[in-house]
Amino acid sequence: TAEFMPDPSLGVGKTQDNKVIVFGRYSTEYFVNAATENFAFQRVATRAIKIGIVGTHAKCEAGDAWFILGGRKEESISIHRLGVGSAEKIATREIDKILGEYSETELQASVVESYDEDGSTFIIVHLSNHVLKFNLTLALGGGTQHAWSILNTGVTYSPWRGKHGVFDPRLGKWVFGDKLSGKVGILDSTVATQYDQIAEWVLFTPFANFERQSIDEFGIETIPGFTTTDDATVFLSMTTDGVSYGMEKTIPYGAPNIYTKRFVVRRLGYVSSWIGFKLRGATRSRTAFALARVTHG
C-alpha cells in the first residue's frame, strides 16, 4: 500500500527515466533504485499522486505519459493522463456516460493498451461491451472533444475483436489477437473490412442552429478515386432531437480512379431550429472524410 493512502497495489510499470511506478486503487507512487542495504528502492515523494487504477491491466504507457482507467477516492471512474506529479482527465462527457453503465467490479477486468501507426498514437480501452479509442495525436492538436471514437465489429454494434496488439518488426505491422477465436489479425489501413467481413461505420456531426433557414447544400471534404470497389456509398440522415432520425438519403462518395468526385447533397429542406447529421456506411471501400460544410440561408 502507499504511504499516504491505505489502498492495495494493483499494478507496476517503468517510466522512461528508469523509475518504478506502482499503481494503487487510489494512489500512484514512483520509486528509484537507490541500492540501499535494507530496501533497494527509495520513494520519490514529489511525484506521488492521489489517483489510481481500477484493475491490474487498466493502464498503458504512450509517449512520455501513462494513461489509466481509474480515479480518485470518492470520484467516478474515468480515463486520465498521468504526467510528472499531475493527472489530467481526458474522457469527454459521452465517454463518462459509457463508463457509468458499468459497476467498478465490471471495470476491474478492463484492458488499456496503445499503438502507433502512420505518425499517430492511439489509446484503446477494452470494456466488456465497448471498445473505446482515443487519438492522442489529434487531441494534442485539436483537443480531446473530437479525439474519441467507439470501435465495433460487423454491422450489429458488437465490440471490436482485436486485443493485445504487438508490433511485428518482420512484417512492419501491428498484430492483434482475436477475442472470439484463435485467429491473429494484422492491422491494415489499406482495407476497410475485418477478416474480409464488412464492418459498419457511423459518424455524427455536432448540432447547429439554423433557425428558420433552409439547408441548400451539405458537403464533405474527402479523397475520392482510391477505392478499389464500386460500393462506396454513404447513408445520410438528419435529426432535430438527437433521438429519432429522418429518412436516409443514399449518396455515392467515390469510384475507382475517379479523382474529381465531390460528395455533395443539395436541397435538404427547411429547418425550424437545431439540426444534426448522421452518416453511416457498410461497404468494402475505405472512407476518408475530413471536414463537413453546410450552406444555408
Image: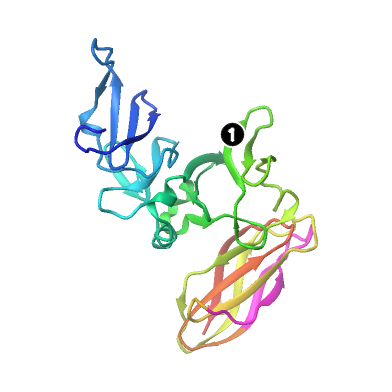
Residue 221 on image: x %, y % = 61, 63
Q: Residue at x 24, y 33 (%)?
A: 2
Residue 170 on image: x %, y % = 68, 27
Q: Residue at x 28, y 54 (%)?
A: 75
Residue 268 on image: x %, y % = 61, 83
Front residue of this view, candidates 14 and 23:
23
Q: Residues within 10 Å of mark 1 (few under 14, many from 20)?
A: some
The residue where tag 1 is placed is 166
Residue sticking out furthest to the front: 105
Q: Is residue 76 left or right of residue 120?
A: left
Q: Residue at x 63, y 40 (%)?
A: 177
Q: Is residue 21 left or right of residue 197?
A: left
Residue 24 on image: x %, y % = 31, 37
The number of discs equals 1
Q: Secondary structure at mark 1?
A: strand
Q: Is residue 249 magenta?
A: yes
Screen quadrant of the N terminus? top left
> Quick check: can you spot residue 167?
yes
> Quick check: can you spot residue 90?
no
